[in-house]
Image (cartoon, rainbow, N blue to C red):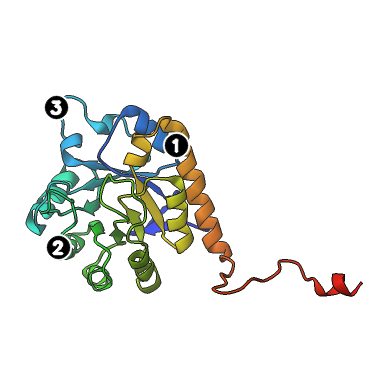
Amino acid sequence: MADQLILGGHAFTSRFILGSGKYSLDLIRAAVEHAGAQMITLALRRANSDTDSILDHIPEGVTLLPNTSGARNADEAVRIARLARACGCGDFVKIEIMRDSKYLLPDNFETIRATEALAREGFVVMPYMYPDLNVARDLVNAGAACVMPLGAPIGSNKGLATREFIRILIDEIDLPVIVDAGIGRPSQACEAMEMGAAAVMANTAIATAGDIAAMAGAFKSAIEAGRAAYLAGLGRVLDHGAAASSPLTGFLAD
């Protein structure tokens, strides 16, 4: 219980977040029951459906994280966030602003603007961003609850393509760093946690797995293992040569 993820004054024991995108009842059930998700993102259009609302399938006690998917600028993102809160989705919001329709890369400048506006209105703002140290610092100043750098393009399952830039954010930013987008394997989630990431968001990697429930469980185990390794302090890495794991001097002398 001592090792909690704190976001906007709210405490979470799970460090896995289910991302938006590919949704199914099986995926939501697996994320909660097998991956231990305590936070699930959703697009407003899914919550506001006249036919089958995703809200009907998210268990009570799970924190909703509406995202501003579809927003092309800060004004649109702010409008979507306000609508989500009016629909009963709470004060958490994930900022996603993308003008690029091919690679779906976030617009960092507009993200800073939206973060500042929504933080002033009392939202717990979790901005999705391209990993850039100066942008991350601006997001801290704007009132973000965390920063969410992409590991690789959304839905690509390519893993930690931006590894070194994420490492810089972890070292320099005094906010939780949550790796969002691109994580495709439990081993990649584990690596992110070993680096010191506060949490990992995934969707496609689990949704497209052969066994959704088993993959959700694998992600849970990997994230917990990576976190435990980070807290334990990883062993040294030698750039040159080798070092015996057991001393040989006494043995040879005998």
**Marks 1 and 3: CB-CB under 8 Å?**
no
Q: Amino acid at mark 2?
A: Ala
Q: Where does residue 246 sit, x and y in percent of width and height?
A: 75, 67
In the orientation shown, which residue stands out farthest toward the top?
A: 51
Q: Nearer the viewer, residue 212 or 78?
A: 212
Residue 50's tag is 3
Q: Amino acid at mark 1?
A: Met
Q: Residues within 10 Å of mark 1 (few under 14, many from 20)?
A: many
Residue placed under numbered mark 2 in the picture: 117
Q: Residues within 10 Å of mark 2 (few under 14, many from 20)?
A: some
Q: Nearer the viewer, residue 210 or 72?
A: 210
Q: Where does residue 245 sit, x and y in percent of width and height?
A: 71, 66
**Marks 1 and 2: CB-CB under 8 Å?**
no
Residue placed under numbered mark 1 in the picture: 215
Residue 163 sits in quarter: bottom left
Q: Where does residue 139 sit, x and y in percent of width and height?
A: 24, 67
Q: Amino acid at mark 3?
A: Asp
Q: CA distance from mark 3 to mark 2?
A: 30 Å
Residue 43's tag is none
